[in-house]
Image (cartoon, rainbow, N blue to C red):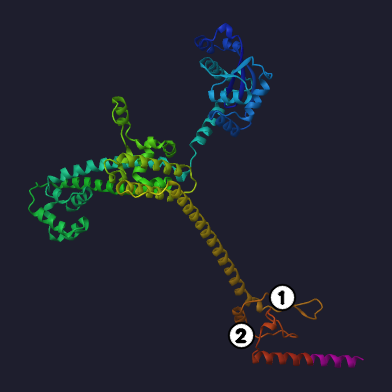
């Protein structure tokens, strides 16, 4: 049976035919030895066809399809054109060797071409990869290296693409750093307590909080300098005036030894470092809360930001956590106890990281396993909603939390909880209502902005009209009548403004007493006395000019 080899390179698809396999024998050792020698390997394997990729984007698409175990149309056409055709109802007298078994199964399902992928085929493909630039004449080794480098960069870049707002890696790093900071702050605080206790041992019993102890150690410095004047300052730090007085009284009768100024400076600097670390830890916790509300709002509202972040970091990513069943999520973090129980045939653990949730602590001893199983179920639902939903909302997490509360009441008091179907329907309706409200708010904002822009344009037009009133009317070519400018009907407020302006600026155009300002006279209900006088003057002037014209005509006759 003839053997063909499909080789996917960075520059294109290539098909090779393996000859004389009976001479070598299907032995991986013999093939491995013959691969290194080109003259010997070239007699066994020969190039049949080569199909180059059209562009770098085409190469990337083909590479992605091969990695996912899919056969593209180009690959199918290439194989059907260059492989021997198989008659219907008969078995093929050849087989196709491929490097990826998934691609081979896909090719066999679609084209019925028998494929194989074993050590023998992989050794032959290794030899093809080693001498690939020798089989193709016009292909230079430098060009092949450039194509491989470019395809490798683009393929890696495409695999690493993500949404910036939903990067769960930041949550994983933040929770790891938060854990290390907790350990470091605790150890450093104990060191500050031990160090400063040589000078002021009574302060340890008065102040229990590490952060406040470091702040007081920095502010007090030397206990012998403490007096009643320092009570307000200590009260601001501690938050209690009685404790501040107690510190001052203890400093007066302290049994601690005196320290040199250099030692006190070192203690003070170290206390400042502990204070800075504690403040940074608070800021990091706030950052973690905001990131969890962006990435997994439902999981955070259900089980808390810290526990949810621990679950995501232990699973590796939010998508991995969403793929986990609830039984796996229940014992995440208790793998050692699980395998120890399986090995010794003991009782398996009931909970892992979700034990830090407040729900399991509130449940009774006999119901801790039940509530852990129920909580893991709801956490798996919340993680899947966060991972695969496009709408960023925490309504589902709040409803799931209500369900867990109802289940706790059911175990304690026997109150029947709601059904999951009803709760999910209510959550979906509330999300739809919220999205519709957001859309309506967005439309209202757009409408208000459009209205504001229209009002601004109208105001600009109104402000520009008095300037147009001073312009004289345009006279037609015949000289008989002026051309009236096109005007729209204005509101009453505008008419009042125009009448006031007309009273201030009287018209001075000869021959016509209407439409001086581009406004019709019909809209004016009342005329002032000045307008009547002006109209009478204009009429008298027009009659006088007519009489003069008649006299001139009579004299001419």
Front residue of this view, candidates 363 and 493 = 363
Q: Secondary structure at mark 1?
A: loop
Residue 118 location (% of width, % of height): 52, 17
Question: Which residue position holds label 2?
Answer: 504
Residue 159, horizontal then vertical, whole percent:
50, 35
Task: Give the Cα separation between the discs numbered 1 and 2.
Answer: 22 Å
Element marked by disc 2: helix
The quadrant of the picture occupied by the C terminus is bottom right
**Res. 485 mark:** 1
Residue lying furthest right: 557
Residue 100 seen in render:
no
Chief secondary structure of the magenta portion: helix
Name which residue lies at 69% across and 75% down: 487
Q: In the image, which residues are magenta?
A: 544-557
| Quadrant in the rendering for residue 39 | top right
Is residue 49 visible in this depiction of the protein? yes
Is residue 555 shown in magenta? yes
Q: Is residue 114 above or below residue 262?
A: above
Instruction: Give me the residue at 8% from left, 54% from top.
Output: 252
Specify whether 481 is left or right of 81. Answer: right
Q: Is residue 163 magenta?
A: no
């Amino acid at each position: 049976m003839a053997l063909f080899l499909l080789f996917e390179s960075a520059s294109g698809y290539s098909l090779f035919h393996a000859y004389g396999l009976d001479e070598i024998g299907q032995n991986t050792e013999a093939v491995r030895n013959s691969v290194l020698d080109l003259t010997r390997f070239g007699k066994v394997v020969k190039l049949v066809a080569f199909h180059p990729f059209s562009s770098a984007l085409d190469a990337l698409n083909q590479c992605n399809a091969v990695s996912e175990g899919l056969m593209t149309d180009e690959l199918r056409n290439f194989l059907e054109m260059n492989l021997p055709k198989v008659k219907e109802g008969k078995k093929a007298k050849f087989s196709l060797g491929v490097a990826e078994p998934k691609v081979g199964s896909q090719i066999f399902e679609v084209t019925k071409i028998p494929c194989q992928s074993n050590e023998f085929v992989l050794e032959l493909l290794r030899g093809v990869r080693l001498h690939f630039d020798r089989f193709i004449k016009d292909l230079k080794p430098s060009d092949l290296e450039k194509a491989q480098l470019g395809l490798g960069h683009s393929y890696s870049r495409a695999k690493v693409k993500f949404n910036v707002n939903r990067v769960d890696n930041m949550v994983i790093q933040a929770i790891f750093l938060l854990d290390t900071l907790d350990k470091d702050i605790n150890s450093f605080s104990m060191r500050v307590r031990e160090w400063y206790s040589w000078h002021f041992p009574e302060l340890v019993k008065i102040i229990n909080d590490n952060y406040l102890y470091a702040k007081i150690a920095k502010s007090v410095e030397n206990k012998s300098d403490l007096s009643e004047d320092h009570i307000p300052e200590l009260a601001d730090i501690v938050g209690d005036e009685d404790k501040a007085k107690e510190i001052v009284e203890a400093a007066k009768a302290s049994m601690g030894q005196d320290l040199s100024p250099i030692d006190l400076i070192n203690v003070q600097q170290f206390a400042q470092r502990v204070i800075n670390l504690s403040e940074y830890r608070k800021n990091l916790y706030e950052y973690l809360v905001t990131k969890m509300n962006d990435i997994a709002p439902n999981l955070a509202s259900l089980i808390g930001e810290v526990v949810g972040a621990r679950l995501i970091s232990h699973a590796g990513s939010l998508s991995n956590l969403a793929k986990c069943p609830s039984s796996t999520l229940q014992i995440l973090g208790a793998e050692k106890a699980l395998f120890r129980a399986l090995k010794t045939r003991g009782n398996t653990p009931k909970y892992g990281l979700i034990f830090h949730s407040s729900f399991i602590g509130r449940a009774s001893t006999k119901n801790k396993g039940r509530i852990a199983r129920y909580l893991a179920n709801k956490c798996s639902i919340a993680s899947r909603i966060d991972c695969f939903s496009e709408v960023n909302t925490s309504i589902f997490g709040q409803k799931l939390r209500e369900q867990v509360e109802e289940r706790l009441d059911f175990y304690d008091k026997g109150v029947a909880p709601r059904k999951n179907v009803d709760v999910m329907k209510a959550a979906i309706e509330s999300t739809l209502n919220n999205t519709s409200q957001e859309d309506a708010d967005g439309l209202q904002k757009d409408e208000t902005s459009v209205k504001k822009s229209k009002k601004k344009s109208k105001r600009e037009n109104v402000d520009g009209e008095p300037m147009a009133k001073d312009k004289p009317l345009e006279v037609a070519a015949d000289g008989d009548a002026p051309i009236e400018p096109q005007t729209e009907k204005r509101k009453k407020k505008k008419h009042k403004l125009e009448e006031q302006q007309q009273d201030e600026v009287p018209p001075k155009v000869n021959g016509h007493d209407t439409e001086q300002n581009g406004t019709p006279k019909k809209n004016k209900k009342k005329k002032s006395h000045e307008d009547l006088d002006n109209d009478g003057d204009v009429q008298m002037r027009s009659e006088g000019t007519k009489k003069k014209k008649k006299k001139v005509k009579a004299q001419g006759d």
